Image (cartoon, grey):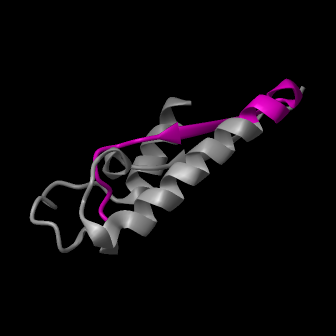
Amino acid sequence: MHKSSIVFMSSIAVERSQGEKWDNYILSKSITDKFLHRISMDYGKYGLQCLSIMPSMVNTPLVEDIKQTKNLLSASKISKEYISFT
């Protein structure tokens, strides 16, 4: 059986309130995570797995205004690191 994966990079920000401007971000990440979980349940028997990885914060334009942006990894770096372990 062919095995395929969908890897969704969420972030710990989904678990924390970051103020009003983050509401849409948190909502979209939460919905996507739950949707992929459902896809895994429905299509896992065919070899599809969906994973959500939640690094701390990822260096994206959305987090540029937050003061704690030192040493953040880029999304591409995190993806490459994940792929190297699988």
Residue under the point 11% across and 59% down: 68
Pick the quarter of the image with the C terminus. Answer: top right
Q: Residue furthest front?
A: 20
Q: Is residue 80 left or right of residue 62?
A: right
Where on the picture, by quarter, is residue 48?
A: top right
Looking at the rendered structure, the number of numbered marks drawn on it comes to 0
Residue under the point 82% across and 29% down: 47
Residue 56 is covered by the magenta coloring: yes
Where is 46 relative to 78, above or below?
Answer: above
Where is 74 relative to 6, above or below?
Answer: below
Residue 80 pos. (x, y %): 47, 48
Q: Nearer the viewer, residue 31 or 54?
A: 31
> Can residue 6 be spotted in the picture?
no
Residue 28 pos. (x, y %): 52, 60
Where is 72 relative to 44, above or below?
Answer: below
Magenta region, residue range: 40-59
Residue 5 is covered by the magenta coloring: no
Residue 6 pos. (x, y %): 67, 45
Where is 56 relative to 2, above or below?
Answer: below
> Can residue 59 be spotted in the picture?
yes
Residue under the point 24% across and 64% down: 19
Q: Is residue 35 left or right of residue 56?
A: right
Q: Is residue 78 left or right of residue 66?
A: right
Q: Nearer the viewer, residue 33 or 85?
A: 33
Pick the quarter of the image with the N terminus. Answer: top right
Residue 15 pos. (x, y %): 34, 44
